[in-house]
Image: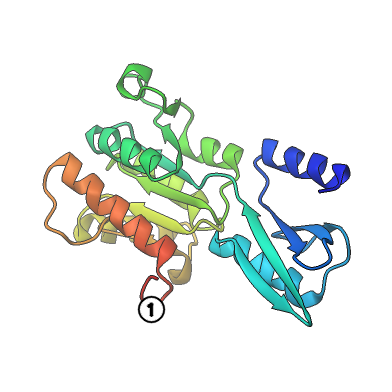
Amino acid sequence: MRREILDRLNGDRAADRAVALVTALDGGAQALVYADGATAGDALPDTAAEAARNALRADRSQQVEAGEETWFVHVHNPPARMVIVGAVHITQALAGMAEAAGYSVIVCDPRRAFADDARFPAIEVSTEWPDDALNRLVPDHRTAVVTLTHDPKIDDPALEVAVRAPVFYIGALGSRRTHGKRLERLREKGFSDDELGRIHAPIGLAIGARSPAEIAVSIMAEVTQVRRQPPGGKSK
């Protein structure tokens, strides 16, 4: 690998920037491809560049054929993120599960009595208001947002940011009746049915969960299903 490619790749990884290293298996040509379409390094066939962008979205390294050449796409994605709004009992279980599944976890709760570092060892805890925290974090297509406080003053601002961001999952705790009232409030603020339809509520897969740990399992399962299973299809 040429030094300039290696230095740039290391810089991208240090900055948590998603990038794919594309290498020709026959000639050794190399380039870096980014999710926004930018490239650096040697010229790539359009087919290889598009395959690299698709690989970034799928979070999966792969070998591709482009013309008469074979290329290997090595994906370097930062960890997926889960922003959990509400430092509640469910969060204590869910944060550990998400971290074990490879997520970078941020727990956000402006109620300092709940957002205690001692309750969430080794997990980033923010006491910002959730909309401020999300705007600072700039949620992207590798971010899941989970709201668990059951308090509209805290959950709603987070949802207002999340539904207009390119996050891959949004979930909100509460019954169907509670969610119906939530949707009414958000519609009054100008949010469309398409935007609000992105919210998974009641949150989690319907597995009959009761305890905080069981509810956390159902949430983690639904997040995984949405991330890994294509719409209308089966996960591989």
Q: Quadrant of residue 90?
A: top left
Q: Nearer the viewer, residue 124 or 196?
A: 124
The residue lying toward the viewer, choosing from 70 and 20, is: 70
For disc 1, the marked residue is 233
Q: Position of residue 149 (x, y in %)?
A: 30, 39
**Residue 69 coordinates in the image, percent (x, y):** 77, 76
Q: Residues within 10 Å of mark 1 (few under 14, many from 20)?
A: few
Amino acid type of the residue tagged 1 in the rendering: Gly
Residue 22: x %, y % from top left:
74, 61
**Image: 160 above or below 84:** below
- Dot 1 lies on which element? loop
Q: Nearer the viewer, residue 86 or 176?
A: 86
Kindly identify the residue that appears in the image at 55 percent across and 61 percent down.
60
Residue shown at 86% from the left, 42% from the top: 3
Residue 141 in sight: yes
Which residue occupies 41% across, 75% down? Answer: 231
